[in-house]
Amino acid sequence: MKRLIITTLAATLMAGTALSGTAMAAGQRYDDHRYDHRYDRHDDRRDERRAYRDGRRDERRDYRRWQRGQRLDARYRDNRYYVSDWRRHGLRAPPRGYRWQRVDDSYILAAVATGLIASVIIANN
């Protein structure tokens, strides 16, 4: 009788462990597949159109008309655009704290520290 009770108890414990093991495995399976890539709808053409559109927008921004009182963009305040030989271009001497920058076909007199535009002269060459 003892042997029957012990065998039944052992079988019950083993069955409970096996069930909890499958439940844990099912839980792991669910955690591993939370994100199903089949439903990931990503249109590469949409990205290409957006990049093309943004590129065109950048081109339009490059050819803007500069006016006195505006701020010169930081990318144009770099030394690449600096005009050191202002006399050769027929420009007046820049006041202290200002310098001439050549952007597109314009000479722009802008403050070094802030980029505030004091004068714009359209180049004729």
Image (cartoon, helix red, strand yellow):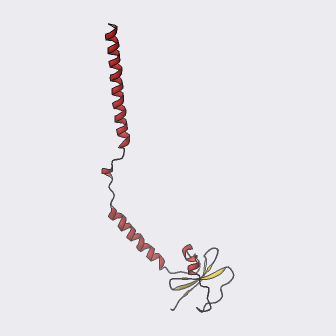
Query: x, y (%) of residue 90?
Result: 60, 92
> Relative to residue 70, is residue 58 drawn left or right?
left
> Relative to residue 11, is residue 55 drawn left or right?
right
Residue at image coords 32%, 23%: 15
* The quadrant where residue 48 appears: bottom left
Q: Examine the rendered structure and indicate whether residue 91 appears above or below residue 99.
A: below
Foreground residue, 57 or 8? 8
* The quadrant where residue 27 appears: top left
Residue furthest front as drawn: 3
Q: Quadrant of the N terminus?
A: top left
Task: Specify whether residue 70 is in view.
Answer: no
Q: Examine the rendered structure and indicate whether residue 86 appears above or below residue 59.
A: below
Query: x, y (%) of residue 63?
Result: 47, 80
* The quadrant where residue 76 appears: bottom right
Query: x, y (%) of residue 89?
Result: 58, 91
Q: Examine the rendered structure and indicate whether residue 47 appears above or below residue 73.
A: above
Residue furthest right as drawn: 96
> Relative to residue 88, is residue 63 drawn left or right?
left
Residue at image coords 61%, 90%: 91
Task: Specify whether residue 7 is in view.
Answer: yes
Query: x, y (%) of residue 109?
Result: 60, 83
Tally of marks? 0
Residue at image coords 33%, 10%: 3
